[in-house]
Image (spheres, grey):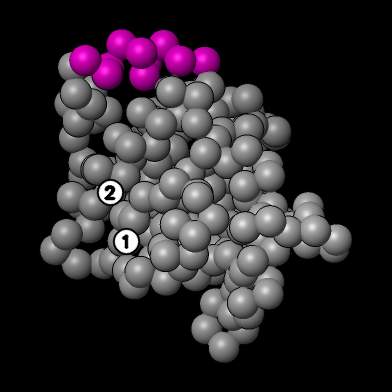
């Protein structure tokens, strides 16, 4: 699509927050969610995503909302639907390995659910503790709560608990990818602003 005028730069998706500095951010579903969803806003936000060098969008919404729109804008995407149930552990394991591999390869990623709520927060807190960026679920939850400026509820905490039951990154990562993933500097979550201060409180 060729856009001009006020749409040329696009607009940043709402509630965009960096989890791993310059590598992994989260946001609200581009265009909004539910009755608030607007086509014009979605177009402007997809333009912004593309112009700001995000290599890939990762949707963790159970439904396939927006996926065809990413194709229209030539934005690569991954769909990893997160939902409490029998397949949660499997999906989290695949998602977390995906994140480590893509970040290690230098990709700039944007993950979204409908809103920046328990699904995003629980998934990201689980990711931090699974990777060993923090040493306890409590610290992971505290870090993410500060980042998103909201309390993680029981739904999000259930996702964190599921993440704690996963095999380690070394066990889940294919052998050929393990060395490059573990050595990559971009996976150092401590680079994110104020992380050390939050994690040690």
Q: Report the side of 47 relative to 25 (left or right).
A: right
The residue sitting at 41% across, 50% down in the picture is 77
Quadrant including the N terminus: bottom right
Query: Circle 1 — which element?
Result: loop
Secondary structure mostly seen in the magenta stretch: helix
Quadrant including the C terminus: top right
Query: Circle 2 — which element?
Result: helix
Q: Is residue 87 visible?
A: yes
Determine which residue is flagged by label 1.
82
Q: Nearer the viewer, residue 3 or 41?
A: 3
Determine which residue is flagged by label 2.
92
Picture layout, residue 97 above or below residue 10: above
Residue range highlighted in magenta? 176-185
Extreme left residue here? 86
Q: Report the side of 177 relative to 100 (left or right).
A: left
Dividing the picture into quadrants, the one containing residue 42 is bottom right
Q: Which of 85 and 199 is in front in this view?
A: 85
């Amino acid at each position: 699509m060729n856009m001009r005028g006020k749409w040329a730069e696009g607009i940043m998706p709402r509630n965009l927050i960096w989890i791993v500095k310059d590598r992994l951010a989260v946001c609200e579903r581009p265009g909004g969610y539910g009755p608030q969803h607007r086509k014009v806003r979605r177009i402007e936000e997809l333009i912004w995503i593309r112009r700001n060098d995000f290599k890939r969008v990762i949707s963790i919404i159970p439904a396939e909302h927006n996926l065809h729109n990413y194709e229209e804008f030539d934005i690569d995407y991954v769909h990893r639907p997160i939902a409490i149930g029998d397949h949660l552990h499997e999906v989290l394991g695949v998602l977390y390995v995906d994140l480590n591999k893509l970040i290690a390869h230098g990709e700039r990623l944007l993950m979204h659910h409908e809103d920046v709520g328990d699904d995003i927060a629980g998934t990201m807190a689980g990711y931090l503790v699974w990777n060993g960026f923090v040493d306890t679920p409590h610290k992971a939850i505290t870090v993410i709560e500060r980042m998103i400026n909201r309390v993680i509820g029981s739904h999000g905490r259930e996702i964190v608990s599921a993440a704690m039951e996963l095999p380690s990154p070394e066990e889940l990562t294919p052998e050929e990818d393990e060395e490059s993933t573990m050595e990559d500097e971009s996976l150092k979550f401590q680079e994110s602003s104020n992380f050390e201060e939050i994690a040690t409180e």
